[in-house]
Image: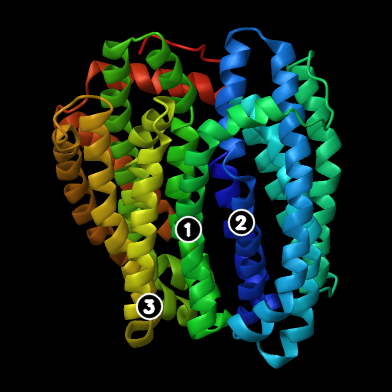
């Protein structure tokens, strides 16, 4: 549900939204969202630290301390939200007139859209406070359902407003209204999950200092992630204009679903590995890493191959021939990029669970810095594909180095364990890609193309089983993840 429904609704709504708004306005809408993401760095890593802290307190049944953490985070977010909102307002004119290549007819609209995004930033922080609680309690069904409902309402309201003749400003205001209305609903649901929760904004300095001890590394990770995932869009808008952002963001959003899927499948790793480190259960931790990595690699390859192989016919039938001509190569490159980043999800979660988030922070900042350097070098001569290639090269080099380092220095393995896990999956992926290329002759419309993509994805588990690569641990971990998908709590240290 968390993965499939947003993809389906995006497939149905995106062509209409892009055609109705136009490439420049849609690019501006995307940049407004990116700007909110960049300002979220002001949370100083407190969100990630709070999730870890609440998980530990919930396990210890220290419910009053959970209230103290939530109250402190809420008070801090309200303060930072006000600062961030003021910053957005003050920087809007410079941003619109100097940084972005905004067409003259969109200049006034762009200013107002950014002004509306200022209170939206504060609202997003408050929402994140209450989505962190069910995640820390390993009630991912609540957090994912909330995300799906908000995404669905926002998309449907966007379509309705456009059909009624409204434009970009109405869409931005409606998005803010939906998030504001979601706060009391989410508070009510969270309190039903944790009846002892008391919602209040009360700052506790000692709790804040404790959060900052761990949160400082989450802050560095957040900075790296924001630069890595968002800076390319802002730079593209500055170098090539808002229209280019649309031709980059639409295929990129599909490719990024790989990241969303692996994140949804592996977000149990952070709290579970924290518990395993606390109990010194090293053997169980290694099983979690090996079996989880094998499953993640298989999942990524199974889905990335059809996305890359069918990129051109899919975009042609979905968005039109002109759109496909400008975007298909970027989709191939971005699919490979997000596949590389997704492969780090197990190692990333274990590093955070061990309390060594600084490892993720350093590597993410390094990958982000390499991406920016390559972007500036390649975007002028190669355009949109150059931006995507810069992203791919930085991720494809940095991701294996990150995994190897965590293997050696956190898990005390050889540093090449992941290569032994990956080579079998790579063989099946090559066969899968070859068969997918053969299927392309039957891509006569969007439905046949999507059907062939699904068939190609299903070829992977079939080939994995046929080659005899399936192991007992694979079945056990799939069962564990199915439990998580049904909304069951997993406990602090499951037998993995």
In the depicted view, which residue is nearer to us: 215 or 492? 215
In the image, residue 460 above or below residue 355: below
Q: Residue at x 73, y 27 (%)?
A: 70
Is disc 3 placed on a helix, strand or loop? helix
Q: Quadrant of the C terminus?
A: top left
Note whether residue 72 is visible.
yes
Where residue 17 appears, as percent x and y from the top left, is: 67, 69
Point out the tag, 2 or 1, that comes first from the N-terminus: 2
Which label was assigned to residue 37? 2
Is disc 1 placed on a helix, strand or loop? helix
Q: Do the residues under discs 2 and 1 have CB atoms within 8 angstroms?
A: yes
Which label was assigned to residue 229? 1
Note whether residue 487 is visible.
no
**Within 10 angstroms of label 3, few (less than 14), some, or many (20 or more) residues?**
some
Q: Quadrant of the N terminus?
A: top right
Give the residue number, with chain letter if any, for mark 3: 376
Where residue 392 appears, as percent x and y from the top left, is: 31, 62
Q: For the view shown, which residue lies furthest in the bottom direction?
A: 104
């Amino acid at each position: 549900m968390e993965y499939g429904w947003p993809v389906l609704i995006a497939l149905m709504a995106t062509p209409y939204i892009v055609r109705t708004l136009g490439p420049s306005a849609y690019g501006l809408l995307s940049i407004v969202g990116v700007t909110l993401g960049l300002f979220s760095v002001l949370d100083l890593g407190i969100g990630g630290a709070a999730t870890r802290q609440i998980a530990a307190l919930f396990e210890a049944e220290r419910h009053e301390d959970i209230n103290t953490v939530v109250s402190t985070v809420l008070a801090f977010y309200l303060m930072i939200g006000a600062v961030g909102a003021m910053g957005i307002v003050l920087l809007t004119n410079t941003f619109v007139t100097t940084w972005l290549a905004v067409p003259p007819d969109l200049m006034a609209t762009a200013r107002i859209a950014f002004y509306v995004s200022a209170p939206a930033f504060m609202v997003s922080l408050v929402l994140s406070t209450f989505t962190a609680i069910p995640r820390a309690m390993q009630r991912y069904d609540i957090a994912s359902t909330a995300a799906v409902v908000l995404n669905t309402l926002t998309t449907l309201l966007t379509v309705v407003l456009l059909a009624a003749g409204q434009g970009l400003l109405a869409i931005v205001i409606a998005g803010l209204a939906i998030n504001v209305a979601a706060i009391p609903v989410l508070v009510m649901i969270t309190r039903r999950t944790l009846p002892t929760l008391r919602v209040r904004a009360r700052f506790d300095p000692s709790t804040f200092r404790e959060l900052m001890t761990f949160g400082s590394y989450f802050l560095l990770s957040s900075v790296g992630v924001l630069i890595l995932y968002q800076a390319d869009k802002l730079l593209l808008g500055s170098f090539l204009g808002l229209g280019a952002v649309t031709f980059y963001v639409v295929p990129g959003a599909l490719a990024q679903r790989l990241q969303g899927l692996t994140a949804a499948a592996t977000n149990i790793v952070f709290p579970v590995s924290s518990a395993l480190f606390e109990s010194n259960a090293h053997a169980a931790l290694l099983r979690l890493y090996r079996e989880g990595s094998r499953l993640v690699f298989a999942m990524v390859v199974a889905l990335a191959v059809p996305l890359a192989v069918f990129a051109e016919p899919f975009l042609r039938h979905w968005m039109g021939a002109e759109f496909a001509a400008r975007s298909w190569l970027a989709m191939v490159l971005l699919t490979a990029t997000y596949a590389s980043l997704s492969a780090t999800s197990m190692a990333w979660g274990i590093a955070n669970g061990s309390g060594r988030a600084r490892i993720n922070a350093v590597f993410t900042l390094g990958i982000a810095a390499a991406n920016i350097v390559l972007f500036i070098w390649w975007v002028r001569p190669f355009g949109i594909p150059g931006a995507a290639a810069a992203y791919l090269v930085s991720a494809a080099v940095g991701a294996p180095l990150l995994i190897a380092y965590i293997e050696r220095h956190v898990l005390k393995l050889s540093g090449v364990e992941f290569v032994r896990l990956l080579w079998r999956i790579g063989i099946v992926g090559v066969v899968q890609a070859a068969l997918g290329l053969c299927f392309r002759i039957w891509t006569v419309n969007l439905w046949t193309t999507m059907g062939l993509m699904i068939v190609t994805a299903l070829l992977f588990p079939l080939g994995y089983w046929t080659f005899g690569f399936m192991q007992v641990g694979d079945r056990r971990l799939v069962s564990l993840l199915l439990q998580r998908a049904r909304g069951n709590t997993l406990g602090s240290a499951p037998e993995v």
